[in-house]
């Protein structure tokens, strides 16, 4: 035990960083468990689209969307949604929504905003389009 205390005393900055990382990981895990936005793997998203008629909302820029997107996805850039411009997706309030970005990071915040606005079934694609392409799932470029 004395060795650990000596290490902590001699490497204060390293210990502070390590403790900060542990706190961040715990906080992110708790937030994910309490969030109404469910993370889904690409295959689960395919099932939602095919079996529950989920609507795919791609929150990337129009340019990124043209570079390749999920079939029948609607392109509503994150900036529009963050500006509370929900009129483009208002008619899908009761349908399952699968939010897609490039890496899966942007969709969590957008999803929380949509659930607060009253959207009932909000899902975020884990890993975004990057993971979708990695799984060799179809991508439209039209």
Image (cartoon, rainbow, N blue to C red):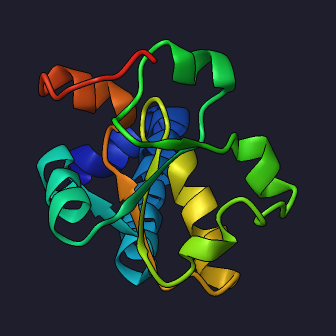
Q: Residue at x 66, y 44 (%)?
A: 76
Query: 113 or 68: nearer the eye?
Result: 68
Provide residue 114's location: percent of width, then percent of height: 63, 72
Provide residue 22's location: percent of width, then percent of height: 39, 55
Provide residue 124's location: percent of width, then percent of height: 40, 57
Reply above or below: 10 against 3.
above
Query: 142 or 64: nearer the eye?
Result: 142
Reply above or below: 142 against 110.
above
Q: Residue at x 20, y 26 (%)?
A: 138
Choose top left, top right, bottom left or bottom right for residue 88. Answer: bottom right
Which quarter of the rendering shows the N terminus? bottom left
Provide residue 75's location: percent of width, then percent of height: 60, 39
**Left or right of 16 on screen, residue 82:** right
Task: Spot the residue most to the right.
Answer: 83
Q: Residue at x 24, y 52 (%)?
A: 2
Reply above or below: 130 against 90.
above
Query: 28 or 7: nearer the eye?
Result: 28
**Left or right of 98 on screen, residue 75:** right
Q: Residue at x 58, y 79 (%)?
A: 115
**Left or right of 108 on screen, residue 62:** right
């Amino acid at each position: 035990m004395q060795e650990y205390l000596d290490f902590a005393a001699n490497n204060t900055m390293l210990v502070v960083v390590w403790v900060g990382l542990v706190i961040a990981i715990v906080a992110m895990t708790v937030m994910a468990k309490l969030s109404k936005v469910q993370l889904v793997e690409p295959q689960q998203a395919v099932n939602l689209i095919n079996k529950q008629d989920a609507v795919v909302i791609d929150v990337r820029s129009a340019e990124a969307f043209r570079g390749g997107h999920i079939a029948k996805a609607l392109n509503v850039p994150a900036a529009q949604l963050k500006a509370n411009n929900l009129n483009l997706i208002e008619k899908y309030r009761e349908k399952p929504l699968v939010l897609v970005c490039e890496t899966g990071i942007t969709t969590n915040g957008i999803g929380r905003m949509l659930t607060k606005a009253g959207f009932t079934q909000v899902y975020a694609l884990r890993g975004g389009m990057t993971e979708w392409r990695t799984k060799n799932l179809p991508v439209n470029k039209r």
